[in-house]
């Protein structure tokens, strides 16, 4: 059984992945932040699921990119729990988690063709965390498909998460200024899908750039998709010692950049 944590943004979530493939999730209140709410959310999730910490085989967590504070909170909790329980940790890329969330929605909507899409989070200061993906072939089990459009939310109980295959990475996670992303996206051959909370802001100046863009900003990374990725990584032996688990920020903090700028100016 795997505990999954997602704390890269303003709110967070926790999930339990059961051996049969079922996933049960709990979300922290929006805007409350993860530092104060994550531990109670995990405690409530374990209690309501009647699971003991001794039942856990690994703790998986998003390691970045994302909020400095959020990532530190999630990684610290994953390290502490895994060290105390003597189990491994699994660090997953936030933008890949977001891609899996969108992938799941495509399958639930009954999408039959593969599509290219970008996942994007606002990195602030005029920059964005971005990655590009090609959706996986449709799942063989279509029991979760619907006849309508892409869902807007995730059920707290998500069955058969192991059936969802990860999308193929086309452009790895990186941080880019808005203009640089538009130059990169100009190579897209057709309509450009941009998924994630930073999508609307990233496309704010789209009218001045060639191409057709669609922003799907309602999607956010969830702990349920952390579990989906962690199951695959655990089976492949891609685990980390709690002592070696570290956040991946992709850039220095504002304080670090200010200190560097001061040294450069001297």
Image (cartoon, helix red, strand yellow):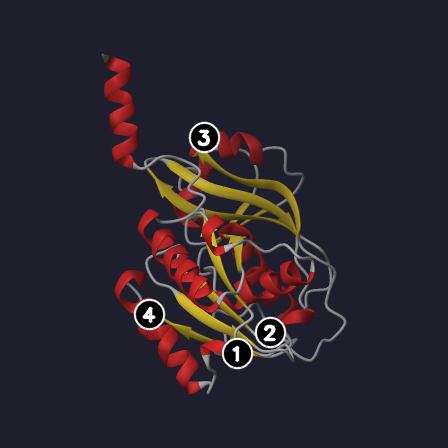
Q: Nearer the viewer, mark 1 or mark 2?
A: 1
- Mark 3–mark 4 distance (CA, rounded to whole Å): 39 Å
Looking at the rendered structure, which numbered label has been put on residue 39? Answer: 4
Q: Nearer the viewer, mark 3 or mark 2?
A: 3
Q: Nearer the viewer, mark 2 or mark 4?
A: 4
Q: Earlier in the sequence, mark 2 or mark 4?
A: 4
Name the quadrant containing residue 45.
bottom left
Q: Which residue is mark 2?
A: 148
Q: Earlier in the sequence, mark 3 or mark 1?
A: 1
Assign a secondary structure to mark 1: helix
Q: Earlier in the sequence, mark 1 or mark 2?
A: 1
Q: Which residue is mark 3?
A: 179
Assign a secondary structure to mark 2: loop
Give the residue displayed 34% in from the left and 62% down from the top.
11
Q: Nearer the viewer, mark 3 or mark 1?
A: 1
- Mark 3–mark 2 distance (CA, rounded to whole Å): 35 Å
How far across and down, in percent of the image, does residue 163 sit? 69, 70
Q: Residues within 10 Å of mark 3 (few under 14, many from 20)?
A: some
Give the residue displayed 59% in from the left and 56% down from the top.
239
Q: Nearer the viewer, mark 4 or mark 1?
A: 1
Quadrant (top left/top right/bottom left/bottom right) for the C terminus = top left
Assign a secondary structure to mark 3: helix
Tell whether 141 sits left or right of 262. Answer: right
Residue at the far right in the pictured view:
140
How far across and down, in percent of the image, does residue 63 sit? 46, 51
Looking at the rendered structure, which numbered label has been put on residue 55? Answer: 1
How far across and down, in percent of the image, does residue 111 sit? 68, 65
């Amino acid at each position: 059984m795997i505990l999954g944590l997602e704390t890269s943004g303003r709110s967070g979530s926790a999930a339990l992945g059961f051996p049969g493939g079922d996933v049960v999730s709990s979300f922290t209140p929006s805007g409350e932040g993860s530092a104060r709410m994550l531990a109670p959310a995990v405690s409530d999730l374990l209690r309501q699921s009647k699971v003991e910490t001794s039942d856990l085989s690994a703790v998986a967590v998003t390691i970045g990119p994302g909020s400095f504070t959020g990532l530190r909170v999630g990684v610290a909790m994953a390290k502490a729990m895994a060290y105390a329980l003597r189990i491994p940790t699994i660090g997953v890329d936030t933008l890949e988690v977001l891609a899996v969330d969108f992938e799941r929605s495509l399958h639930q909507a009954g999408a039959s063709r593969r599509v290219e899409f970008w996942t994007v989070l606002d990195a602030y200061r005029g920059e964005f965390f971005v990655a590009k993906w090609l959706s996986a072939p449709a799942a063989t089990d279509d029991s979760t498909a619907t006849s309508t459009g892409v869902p807007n939310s995730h059920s707290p109980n998500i069955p058969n998460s192991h059936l969802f295959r990860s999308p193929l990475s086309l452009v790895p996670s990186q941080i880019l200024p808005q203009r640089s992303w538009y130059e990169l996206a100009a190579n897209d051959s057709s309509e450009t899908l941009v998924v994630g909370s930073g999508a609307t802001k990233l496309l704010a100046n789209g009218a001045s750039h060639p191409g057709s863009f669609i922003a799907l900003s309602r999607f956010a990374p969830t702990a349920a998709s952390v579990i989906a990725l962690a199951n695959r990584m655990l089976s492949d032996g891609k685990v980390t010692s709690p002592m070696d688990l570290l956040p991946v920020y992709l850039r220095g903090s504002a304080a670090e950049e200010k200190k560097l700028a001061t040294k450069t100016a001297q």
